[in-house]
Amino acid sequence: MTIWDLHCHPASFGGRTPEESMAELVKLADRMGVERLCIYLSTLAHTDPTADQLRQHNDYILRCVNHFAHRVFGFVYVNPNHVQASLDEINRCVRDGPMTGIKLWVARRCNDAAIDPIIERAAALKAVIFQHTWLKTGGNLPGESSPMDMAVLAARFPNVPLICGHTGGNWEIGVRAMRPFPNVSVDLAGSDPTAGFTEMAVRELGARRVIYGSDTGGRSFSSQLAKVHGAAIPDEARQRIFSENLKEMMLPILRAKGVRL
């Protein structure tokens, strides 16, 4: 099957330069049959990055994209605590550069309306919008969004396609939290390959709202691919999850940029 991976971190693969790290990631993707990779974040060291740190993260990803444009799509890292700097980075990397999506991690929870100008700008450019979510037993990081926070954001932007990263980590809660919002797709990446995860997502949301990702660097390709390969779902649904849903979400911005697949 054709496989596109929504969720990759090239910096996790070592190397003296972004290009070397990306080369190692592509080598592993080739081994596992992954055709295209969405990449973001140079490290996880900055949970509330300054404007300068945002630019450094995004410069790293730009170098990866510039050398592997035939294999990767870059997502610009933004921080709602620095709205103007984030808008400037979206303009630099998406409007005027090769990137095709935005990545929101931690710093400010996405239920906060301070994030709205970032969502509006990304949507105007047809960029894919990816919001990290998690539910930690010991408590989330400061500014880390939960699936319930994502539900508040989804309700504010009912006509904007959004992706709920990790399906909240605790996927049984995350799937249910996203069920009322047809504009939200869920990302399978990052959690353990527990039996029933993909089946529940397809049953409750429909196969068109489920997207494969690995969180590779933090997780292995093999464990995350197993969530979809091993799921008791039809092959048509499997192919949608592995690539077709992400392709359809990305087509508007790829067409706007003149990218041929």
Image (tube, grey):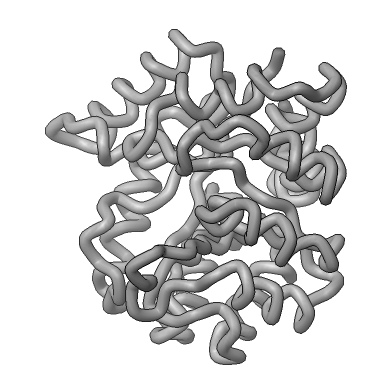
Query: Residue reaching furthest left?
Result: 16
Residue 248 relative to residue 10: left or right: right
Asked whether 189 or 25 is in front, the reply is 189
Query: Residue reaching furthest bottom?
Result: 113
Query: Residue reaching furthest top?
Result: 31
* Quarter residue 216 falls in: top left
Residue displayed at 56% across by 78% down: 110
Give the x, y percent position of residue 188.
Answer: 60, 42
> Would you place residue 104 above or below residue 249 in this image?
below
Q: How many marks?
A: 0
Residue displayed at 52% across by 41% down: 189
* Quarter residue 129 falls in: bottom right
Give the x, y percent position of residue 44.
Answer: 27, 56
Q: Quadrant of the N terminus?
A: top right
Residue displayed at 78% across by 38% down: 245
Give the x, y percent position of residue 10.
Answer: 33, 37
Asked whether 251 or 28 is in front, the reply is 28
Q: Quadrant of the C terminus?
A: top right
Residue 235 relative to residue 61: left or right: right
Residue displayed at 49% across by 80% down: 109
> Would you place residue 246 above or below residue 237 in this image?
below
